[in-house]
Image: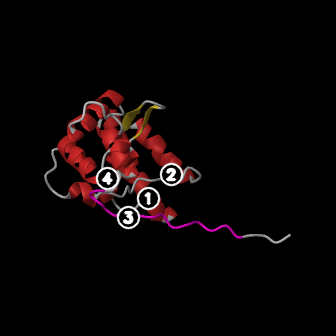
Amino acid sequence: MAKTKRTNSAKVVPTYDPEGPINAFQKQRILQNCNYQMDIKSEWVQWVTGDTNRTSLSSITQAEAVRIMKQQTGDTTEAVEKYSDNWGVFDKENGQHRYILSILRQANIVVKSDKWGEIPDMSGFFNRFLRSPKSPVKKPLKQMSPTEVSKIITALEGVALWKNQI
C-alpha cells in the first residue's frame, strides 16, 4: 500500500473587496469588539444596513464591516485594513504556544466568550503586543522558531508578574 505525504496547504489571505461578503477576520473582530454579546452585534448590523430586520454579520459586505470596525474603535485611519491578519494565531499542539495561553490567563488578559466563558486575548492584546516596539520578536507566532518563542514567553512572564503585583 502506497503512503501519501500530507502537505499543509497555504493559508489563503482574503483580498479586500468592498462589495464582497464579510470575511472571517472581520466577523471575529466585530464580535470581539462587542465582547461577544450577540445583541450588541445585532445592533451594529442594523445600524450599518439601516434595516432593523437584519441582524446577521453574514448579511453585510466587507465595506460595511470596515465601517462598523472603524466606528467601534474610533479609528479614522486605514489601520483596520492594515491589521487584517492576526499574529496571535497559535498551534494547540505546540507546548510553548499553550504555555503562552496559560501566561495570558494568569495575567487576566482575557476576553469574554459565549462558548468558553473567558479565553486568552490572542487576537487583541497578544496580536498588538507582537506588532509593538515592546515585543522582542516582531513576526507572527506561528512563524517563530522555538528560541524566538522563548523570548516572547520571557517578556509575557514579566507582564504577568507586573499585573499580579498591582
Q: Does label 1 or label 4 sit earlier along the sequence?
A: 4
Decide: is 14 above or below 39. Answer: below
For mark 2, give the secondary structure. Answer: helix
Tag 1: residue type? Leu
Tag 4: residue type? Phe
Q: Tell me if 78 is positioned left or right of 40 in this view.
A: left
Tag 2: residue type? His
Q: What stretch is highlighted in magenta?
A: 5-19
Residue at coordinates 40% horizontally, 50% vertically from top-left?
24
Q: Residue beneath label 3, please?
A: 139
Q: Residue beneath label 2, please?
A: 97
- Which picture quadrant has residue 38? top left
Q: Is there CB contact under 8 Å for labels 1 and 4?
A: no
Alpha carbons under labels 3 and 4: distance apart: 10 Å
Q: Does label 3 or label 4 sit earlier along the sequence?
A: 4
Q: Residue 129 carries which label?
A: 4
Alpha carbons under labels 2 and 3: distance apart: 14 Å
Alpha carbons under labels 1 and 4: distance apart: 11 Å
Q: Does label 4 or label 2 sit earlier along the sequence?
A: 2
Decide: is 59 above or below 14. Answer: above
Residue at coordinates 26% horizontally, 60% vertically from top-left?
82
Q: Residue beneath label 1, please?
A: 141
Tag 3: residue type? Lys
Percent from the top left, x then y, of residue 92? Answer: 55, 49
